[in-house]
Amino acid sequence: MRILSMPDKWEYPWFAAWDLAFHCVPIALVDGEFAKEQLWHLLFEQFQHPNGQIPAYEWEFSDLNPPVHAWAVWRVFNMDRIRSGTADREFLEKCFHKLLVNFTWWVNKVDSSGNNLFEGGFLGLDNITLIDRSENMRDGAKLKQSDATGWMGMFCLNLMRIALELAKENSAYESMATKFFQHYLHIGAALKNRGGKGVELWDEKDGFFYDVLEYPNGSMHKFRVRSLVGLIPMFSLERLEEKWLQPFPEFRAHLDWVLKNRPDLVEPCVTTIKEGKWKTHVLAVMNPDQMRRLLERVWDPAEFRSDHGLRSLSKYHEEHPVHFESSTLRYEAAESLVMLKGGNSNWRGPIWFPMNFMMIESLRKLRKAYGDDFRVAGSDGTDVSLDEMARGFADGLISLFTRDAENHRPIHGREARYAEDPHWRDLILFHEYFNGDTGEGLGATHQTGWTALVASLIDEWRD
């Protein structure tokens, strides 16, 4: 009666909530109705818990996946609108109502201190830290997570955009857009410790976001690990063009009031750009200078950038491992030598499609906000534009599947039959993740869910 899309019927026969959200983007290229139906399933009364929590995955409903469903609903809605020529307002509206309940669950359950710093635990990033984030911290400590807080900032902005879209036909939704704009400001200020709570996830010296372990006695330990955890706050990004906001007088009035009267909230996460008579407000938890510093690491081949996409852990840690108590974290391009959580779960270096896809989207949004004049210094002495960075990562991901001069595809390594045997050479595998140095496929070989995002990259970056 209600069919969930599975990436593989034998090797990977279980759903995961955030996997499914990413699946829906390439599915929308061929069947918009099915993609919308998939997103609705997890928000439907018989799937979503009455308290608002979305089941994480089949083996552990109560674990936490990143809150990407508002992003997926908004993106699939727009893809379907462009392809069909009709905006499915009913789909957007009914999903919005359920997402409100899910958002409230996150705020009430995952922000135990009420300071807008979130403790999401696992969040899909299995081996990216020195500790198992699904487990309770000993001695009553709380792990304040840069990625959980970044995801929640993005959640706010996704719901703000959906509310403004719905307000085009029903002005009552303007107040909801205002609510999520305001909540985003508080989360952004908390990330930068502008709420005066003492927990600072942004490190101005390093130009990076880190997790912080907070002990009951007030002492703290900052995990100086350069990983996707510290890049995810960059996904909390949107722009508001004053010209575009003209139909929303209530939202616009609140925006103007906040910009004038709350510099403590605005300064950390709103940058205003004036072009002619109109202004654009860039909602990002970093100012342009901080963004450049972060992106310099992203584009550095000695850190995050590989020939085939964004690494999940900086290559810097290959020679500079991080130690905490009895644990050590080191960059490993392929399979992790130490299993922290899960059998084939490895976030200590390899390339994962979902995070690469989100990075490319963020770079495109920044490009629309800041234009071609915003450039990032490269390690080779040259600089690149945001569009060049986005295209570079998209090209790198697509190149995983394309043949070289010897008919080898990076995903297949140097396996001869995939290059020479006519019965094998056109059988494309969609691995779960990829070697951070060579691009060779790793993990489940039929992860045709989120790795199928390559179809969307081809659709959007190839004529």
Image: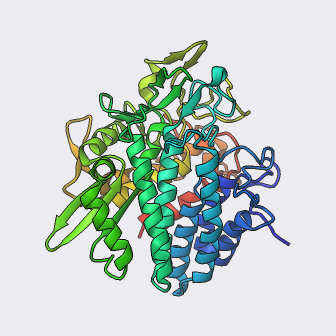
Q: Estimate the x, y position of residue 111 in percent, counting from the top left.
A: 57, 43
Q: Estimate the x, y position of residue 275 in percent, counting from the top left.
A: 16, 68
Q: Estimate the x, y position of residue 359 in percent, counting from the top left.
A: 44, 51
- Residue sticking out furthest to the left: 276
Quarter of image, res 408: top right
Q: Is residue 403 visible?
A: no
For the image, the number of numbered tags is 0
- Residue sticking out furthest to the top: 326
Please identify the quadrant where the N terminus is shown: bottom right
Q: Nearer the viewer, residue 456 or 424?
A: 456
Work out whether 143 lies above or below 18.
Answer: above
Judge from the rendering whether residue 276 lies leftward or rightward of residue 454; answer left or right: left
x 42%, y 64%: residue: 461
Work out whether 267 lies above or below 131.
Answer: below
- Residue sticking out furthest to the front: 261
x 58%, y 30%: residue: 142
Q: Is residue 324 visible?
A: yes
Judge from the rendering whether residue 35 lies leftward or rightward of residue 407; answer left or right: right
Work out whether 310 lies above or below 7.
Answer: above
Q: Estimate the x, y position of residue 383 in percent, counting from the top left.
A: 22, 44
Q: Nearer the viewer, residue 391 or 161?
A: 161
Judge from the rendering whether residue 26 lies leftward or rightward of residue 436; answer left or right: right
Please identify the quadrant where the C terminus is shown: bottom left
Colouring rule applied to residues: rainbow
Work out whether 86 lies above or below 54.
Answer: below
